[in-house]
Amino acid sequence: NEIIQLGGDANIMYGTEEACYRGAGGAVSAVDALLGPNPKAKSCFVDVRPPGHHAEPNEHDGLWFLFLAGNAGIAALHARDSM
C-alpha cells in the first residue's frame, strides 16, 4: 500500500477516499435521523475529524474533498436541502 505525502502531516493511501465518503455519509445520516420524513432522533453526535484539521494559516495542506468541503458543511447543505 503506497502512501502519498501531500505536505506537512497530510497523507493519502488506500482507503482514504472511502473514509472521506463515510465521514460525510455519517454526517448526512445524522441529518436524516433528525430532519427526515420520519425523524428517529432528537439529537445526534457525529464523531468525525473537523474540516481543515491539517490546514496552515496560508495553505490548505490536505485533501481536496475532506479539507475543503468538510463534513459539517456537507451536513449543513444536506439539512438545508432537506427542508
Image: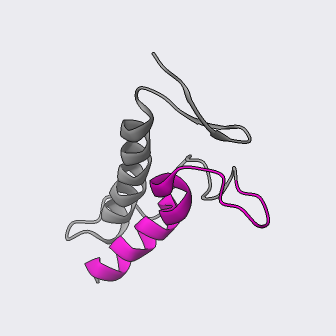
- The front one of 62 and 20 is 62
Q: Main secondary structure of the magenta part?
A: helix
- The front one of 2 and 82 is 2
Query: Does residue 32 lie above or below 10 as drawn?
Result: below
Place of residue 36 in the rendered image (x, y in percent of width and height, measured from the top left): 25, 68
Q: In the displayed orientation, state which residue is furthest to the left.
A: 37
Which quarter of the picture shows residue 6? top right
Q: In the displayed orientation, state which residue is furthest to the right.
A: 57
Which quarter of the picture shows residue 81? bottom left
Looking at the image, residue 73 sits to the left or right of residue 59; the answer is left
Place of residue 29 in the rendered image (x, y in percent of width and height, measured from the top left): 33, 55
Looking at the image, residue 80 sits to the left or right of residue 9; the answer is left
Q: Residue at x 39, y 75 (%)?
A: 77
| Colour scheme employed for the rendering of this structure | one colour
Residue 11 among magenta residues? no
- The front one of 27 and 2 is 2
Q: Residue at x 38, y 43 (%)?
A: 22
Q: Quadrant of the C terminus?
A: bottom left
Place of residue 71 in the rendered image (x, y in percent of width and height, measured from the top left): 48, 59
- The front one of 48 and 64 is 64
Place of residue 32 in the rendered image (x, y in percent of width and height, measured from the top left): 30, 63
Q: In the displayed orientation, state which residue is furthest to the top.
A: 1
Q: Residue at x 31, y 58 (%)?
A: 40
Query: Does residue 19 lie above or below 80 as drawn?
Result: above
Q: How many marks?
A: 0
Q: Residue at x 36, y 59 (%)?
A: 28
Span highlighted in magenta in the image? 55-82
Q: Quadrant of the N terminus?
A: top left
